[in-house]
Amino acid sequence: MEAAVSPRHRARADRCARAGDHAGEAGAAPLPRRAQAAHALDDLLYTNVGYGTSEKVVIHGSGPAFPFDGLRKWTVSAYHALDQSFIHLNQNLNQGWSGTGYGDSGGPTFGDVGNGPVQISVVSTGDVPLYSTSVNTRIDTDDARDFLDPFLALS
């Protein structure tokens, strides 16, 4: 996960990363009932929080390794697409965005909806070179809410 982000996104991302400290506490990151229409999602910033690495290291004779430094990092991505189960986020560095990497799966993605960060998805997968798209499981679907209901206070 690459922590470099443009200065215009830093304040929002800091606020979302702090929300990650309390993501499992009831009410700390209210879950949306339903995602907004796809066109409304274009203007949100998406903050990914995780402990992943931004690169794999190939060790001669033993294959790839993914260094873990124990540091929580955050990145800011943009909206790309929405389907029944997933939100696809743009993490193209050439367009000014960043995203998730090896080891970030299971971490939260927050959308800053103006009145504070709201957890909208869980990092799931992405393109293999980590250059283009992050694919995150939505938490506003009926299936996701049925799974989360015994563990979290849902709004």
Image: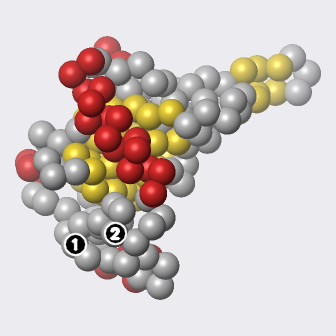
Q: Nearer the viewer, residue 27 or 46?
A: 27
Distance from Cα at disc 2 to Cα at disc 1: 14 Å
Q: Residue at x 50, y 33 (%)?
A: 73
View extreme (right): residue: 61
Q: How is the image coloured?
A: secondary structure
Q: Is residue 98 left or right of residue 42?
A: right
Q: Identify whether 8 is placed above or below 140.
A: above
Judge whether residue 90 can be spotted in this image. Answer: no
Q: Which residue is mark 2?
A: 27
- Residue 3: name its quadrant: top left
Quadrant occupied by the C terminus? bottom left
- Residue 42: name its quadrant: top left
Judge whether residue 113 can be spotted in this image. Answer: yes
Q: Secondary structure at mark 1?
A: loop
x and y, in percent, of residue 30 in the image: 29, 66
Three-letter code, disc 2: Gly
Three-letter code, disc 1: Arg
Q: Which residue is mark 1?
A: 33
Q: Callout 1 environment at 10 Å: few (<14), some (14 to 19), or many (20+)?
A: some
x and y, in percent, of residue 86 in the image: 34, 57
Camera-side mark, 2 or 1: 2
x and y, in percent, of residue 65 in the image: 76, 29
